[in-house]
Image (tube, rainbow, N blue to C red):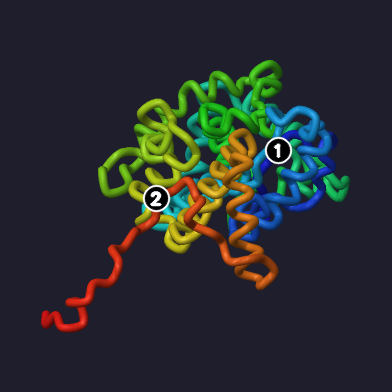
């Protein structure tokens, strides 16, 4: 099982111990209820009640996790239909460019800095986990895929509010991560092209952040248009994520633009009347101009239309 990796300091800070993301779709971020729980924990630690600007919105977490899950699904589709050995070949390519020893140190440091649940809970050492495999895929190849998506998360401007969860700066400081990610375009240019537009996998991955990145909602729209052939049922969930984001935007707007006293009073009168607990509203005194009808005339009953 592979997870949406967040850094060990972020796990410690927010007490995140459960699985956050897996290839099989059992995702915490991609579940609205679980996203609300994680956002609540983060807001408590951040003191968001006293500082609303530090508030984490669950819908944004949900959307971010869904984009990450869709990226996993798209890469899996590429492996299954186009290039089964794409991540194993990447290991050979980068071992040649940065050296086998430096590449191994990068992979091990990744597992140490961004541990999965079994490593974080002390059930396996980073080296033990890295030596294993799951579903016919070596963990070394899986970690290279995670490294690719970690880089994608860090260059995605819409993910910036959550960067503390997956900041790649320690990897840049301690390993050849910077050299490897700089050469990602060179490597994927050597691989078979993919998708309806016939580009390479990396170009398709980053296409959702083209034109300056955009908001999470805008990226979900581009995702549906450009990754739809590969992500299947995730499209329906992408629509749900977009709806959740819109609802949160409205709620935030109302938080800083509360209705006027007159509007509240009018709404209260209406709600009271609808429950049988208030007098019939007198619309003649309302500020709005409702429809007015001329008085009945004696000729009206005889009119034939």
Indicate the quadrant containing the C terminus: top left, top right, bottom left or bottom right: bottom left
The one nearer the camera, 264 or 247, is 264
The residue that disc 2 covers is 289
Q: Where does the image place residue 166, in percent across and percent down from the top left? A: 67, 32
Q: Callout 2: helix, strand or loop?
A: loop
- Sequence-earlier tag: 2 or 1: 1
Query: Position of 213 compared to 253: left or right?
Result: left
Residue that protrudes farthest toward the left in the picture: 305
Q: Position of residue 236 (x, y in %)?
A: 46, 61
Q: Nearer the viewer, mark 2 or mark 1?
A: 2
Q: Is residue 48 left or right of residue 91?
A: right
The quadrant holding residue 128 is: top right
> Badge 2, how many Cα within 10 Å: few under 14, some, many 20+?
few
- Element type where label 1 sits in the image: loop
- Spot occupied by residue 115 in the image (x, y as percentages of width and height): 75, 40
Question: Which residue is situated farthest in the right direction here?
Answer: 122
Whether 214 is drawn above or below 35: the answer is above
Residue labelled with disc 1 = 6
Between 223 and 80, the residue placed more toward the observer is: 223
Which residue shows up at 54% across the image and 19% down it?
A: 179
Q: Is residue 109 above or below residue 142?
A: above
Q: Circle 1: is it few (<14), some (14-19), or many (20+) Cα within 10 Å?
A: many
Is residue 304 shown above or below 28? below
Task: State the image coordinates of residue 17 (x, y, percent, origin top left).
Answer: 82, 48
């Amino acid at each position: 099982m592979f997870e949406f990796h967040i850094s060990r300091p972020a796990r410690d800070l927010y007490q995140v111990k459960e699985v956050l993301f897996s290839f099989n779709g059992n995702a915490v971020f991609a579940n609205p209820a679980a996203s609300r729980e994680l956002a609540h924990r983060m807001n408590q630690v951040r003191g968001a009640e006293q500082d609303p600007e530090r508030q984490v919105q669950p819908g944004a977490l949900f959307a971010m996790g869904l984009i990450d899950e869709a990226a996993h699904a798209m890469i899996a589709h590429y492996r299954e239909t186009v290039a089964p050995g794409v991540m194993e070949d990447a290991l050979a390519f980068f071992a040649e460019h940065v050296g086998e020893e430096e590449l191994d140190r990068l992979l091990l440091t990744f597992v140490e800095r961004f541990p999965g649940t079994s490593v974080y809970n002390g059930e396996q050492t980073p080296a033990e986990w890295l030596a294993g495999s799951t579903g016919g895929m070596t963990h070394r190849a899986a970690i290279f895929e995670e490294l690719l998506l970690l880089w994608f998360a860090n260059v995605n401007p819409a993910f910036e509010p959550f960067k503390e969860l997956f900041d790649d700066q320690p990897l840049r400081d301690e390993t050849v991560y910077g050299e490897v990610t700089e050469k990602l375009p060179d490597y994927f240019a050597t691989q078979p092209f993919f998708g309806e537009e016939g580009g390479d996998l990396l170009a398709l991955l980053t296409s959702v952040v083209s034109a300056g990145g955009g908001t999470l909602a805008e990226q979900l729209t581009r995702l549906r248009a450009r990754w739809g052939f590969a992500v299947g049922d995730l499209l329906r969930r992408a629509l749900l994520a977009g709806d959740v984001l819109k609802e949160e935007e409205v709620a935030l707007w109302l938080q800083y633009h509360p209705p006027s006293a007159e509007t509240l009073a009018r709404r209260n009168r209406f709600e009271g009347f609808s429950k049988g607990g208030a007098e019939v509203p007198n619309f003649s005194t309302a500020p709005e101009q409702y429809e007015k009808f001329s008085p009945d005339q004696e000729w009206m009953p005889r009119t034939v239309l």
